[in-house]
Image (cartoon, helix red, strand yellow):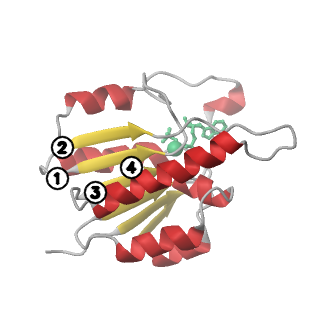
């Protein structure tokens, strides 16, 4: 049995989540069991959520996030803090279930960056993960400790983005 890898997609350019989805697609083709957990988005109508249903039981997607809600002072609301903690508890259960070959923790870097999850906790789970499991962590501003423990780190760099021209999120491109 091979050791699974820890992969990180970070940076300010587009493609972190889509690259992770591409990796899932590839793994499913080898009958590997794949789970993608979204820590921020809770969008049921995205193309990926719909497509996941077409791919059969080897691919499970769970939208754990509720977006971010800040209080007037700019701090995170109790609800957001609770959601982050519960999402992480759920992720840990799935990680240690040893049911999967690949798990994507989508946008988890952002929760760590915002202090909603502790980097030490995440590192300790990565250190103790089931041997065969590949874990992909996505999101901007990946912490140095995460980069250090990873086997593969890619930084997406923005050169151009249609948002800058005022072009809104598009079906099949952004969602
Ligand atoms: P994608 O999900 O399309 O692969 P991503 O995961 O790399 O993108 P995130 O940082 O998760 O990017 O951004 C979430 C959404 O915000 C994406 O749909 C992305 O296209 C959009 N986005 C990325 N860069 C910018 C930007 N500079 N301004 C506005 N929106 C952006
Ligand atoms: Mg993303």
**Quarter of the N terminus within the rendering:** bottom left
The answer for how far apart the CA atoms under marks 2 and 3 are is 10 Å
The answer for how far apart the CA atoms under marks 4 and 3 are is 10 Å
Q: Which quadrant contains ligand 1? A: top right
Residue 130 location (% of width, % of height): 27, 70
Residue 80 in which image quadrant = top right
Q: Check disc 3 and report the residue beneath it.
A: 102
The mark closer to the camera, 4 or 1, is 1
Which element type, helix, strand or loop, lies under badge 3?
strand
Residue 68 in which image quadrant = top right
Q: Residue at x 46, y 66 (%)?
A: 153
Residue contact between numbered discs 1 and 2, judged by CB atoms under 8 Å: yes
> Quick check: is the Cβ at mark 4 less than 8 Å away from ligand 1?
yes
- Residue situated in front as seen by the camera: 6 or 22: 6
| Residue 150 horizontal side relative to residue 144, left or right | left
The answer for how far apart the CA atoms under marks 4 and 1 are is 15 Å
How dense is the environment of label 4, judged by Cα within 10 Å: few (below 14), some, or many (20 and up)? many
Q: Earlier in the sequence, mark 4 or mark 1?
A: 4
Which element type, helix, strand or loop, lies under badge 4?
helix
The answer for how far apart the CA atoms under marks 3 and 1 are is 8 Å
Residue contact between numbered discs 3 and 1, judged by CB atoms under 8 Å: yes
Q: Residue at x 58, y 69 (%)?
A: 119
Q: Check disc 2 and report the residue beneath it.
A: 58
Let me know if residue 12 appears in the view. Answer: yes
Q: Check disc 4 and report the residue beneath it.
A: 20
């Amino acid at each position: 049995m091979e050791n699974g890898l820890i992969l990180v997609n970070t940076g300010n350019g587009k493609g972190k989540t889509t690259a992770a989805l591409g990796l899932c697609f590839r793994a499913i083709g080898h009958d590997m069991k794949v789970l993608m957990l979204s820590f921020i988005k809770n969008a049921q109508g995205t193309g990926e959520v719909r497509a996941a249903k077409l791919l059969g039981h080897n691919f499970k997607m769970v939208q754990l996030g509720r977006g971010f809600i800040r209080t007037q002072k700019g701090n995170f609301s109790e609800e957001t803090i609770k959601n982050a903690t519960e999402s992480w508890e759920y992720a840990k259960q799935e990680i240690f279930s040893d049911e999967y070959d690949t798990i994507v923790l989508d946008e988890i870097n952002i929760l760590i960056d915002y202090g909603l999850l502790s980097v030490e906790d995440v590192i300790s789970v990565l250190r103790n993960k089931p041997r065969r499991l590949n874990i992909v962590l996505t999101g901007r501003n990946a912490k140095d400790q995460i980069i250090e423990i990873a086997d593969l780190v890619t930084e997406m760099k923005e050169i151009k983005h249609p948002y800058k021209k005022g072009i809104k999120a598009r079906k099949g491109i952004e969602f």
